[in-house]
Amino acid sequence: MTKKAMDEQESNKEYLGDIPQTGELQDALFSTADWSVGQSEPPIDSSAARIAELESELNQQKEQSGKYRDELLRKAADFENFRKQKERESMMASSRALEHVIRELLPVIDDVKRLLAHAPVDAERAGEARPYIEGVEMVKKNLEKWLAEKGVKAIESKGMKLDVNFHEAISQVDHPESEPEMIIEEYQTGYLLGEKVIRHAKVIVAR
């Protein structure tokens, strides 16, 4: 055998020696497959724990949000009640102030009515006093207009049956033509502010 042939034989042995044997190749393949499977499967236990943790946090946030919502609704209801109470108090204060002003004004109206009731009736004196009488009548008209705008109206009395809710009898007289407790004369006019009596009418009734 030549030297060249011997070198080629040695080279082939080295090449065959580098190739894994069948058993070794199978072991390597199974080991690789096991590693790949182990790496591809997720850690199930840790994922479930994380999901449970997130669900717990979500439930806590929902509970806290519900508490804030309930608190906000309570505050809104308290504010609405407070606002309505202040409105009622303001309306009542305005109504009391208006009633006070009207009560103070009623005696003035009474004086104006009495003045007109005692105006001169004879032609000469009435002619001389006519400008003053017309001025007083205008004042009376304006006062009555103002009262009407504020919701004030006079209580009907004469010819009515006595009603203690609206009338105050200051005297009784014999009056054969009228039924007992029938109002035959009004001494002082009474007034209503809306539905409230701010002054009872003072009247004279039949006995």
Image (cartoon, grey):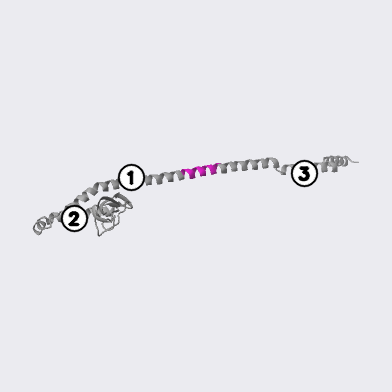
Q: Is residue 65 magenta?
A: yes
Tell me, yes or no, if residue 132 can be seen here.
yes
Question: What is the total number of numbered labels drawn onto the structure image?
Answer: 3
* Residue at the (57%, 42%) spot, across then down: 63
Whole-percent x, y for residue 206 in the image? 26, 55
Which amino acid does the dot numbered 3 rest on? Ala
Prevailing secondary structure class for the magenta stretch in the rendered image: helix
Whole-percent x, y for residue 106 in the image? 24, 49
Q: Compare residues 17 and 192 and report the one nearer the observer.
A: 192
Which amino acid does the dot numbered 1 rest on? Ala
Real-space Cα separation, disc 1 to disc 2, in angstroms: 31 Å
Whole-percent x, y for residue 54 in the image? 62, 42
Single out the residue that lies furthest toward the left: 124
> Mark 3 highlights which residue?
33
Q: Which mark is residue 5?
A: none
Q: Which mark is residue 138?
A: 2
Q: Is residue 122 magenta?
A: no
Badge 1 local density, few (<14 within 10 Å), some, or many (20+)? few
Q: Which quadrant is home to the C terminus?
A: bottom left
> Mark 1 highlights which residue?
93
Side (left or right) of 68 relative to 47? left
Q: Please determine whether, in this image, residue 82 is positioned above or below residue 158.
A: above
Badge 2 local density, few (<14 within 10 Å), some, or many (20+)? few
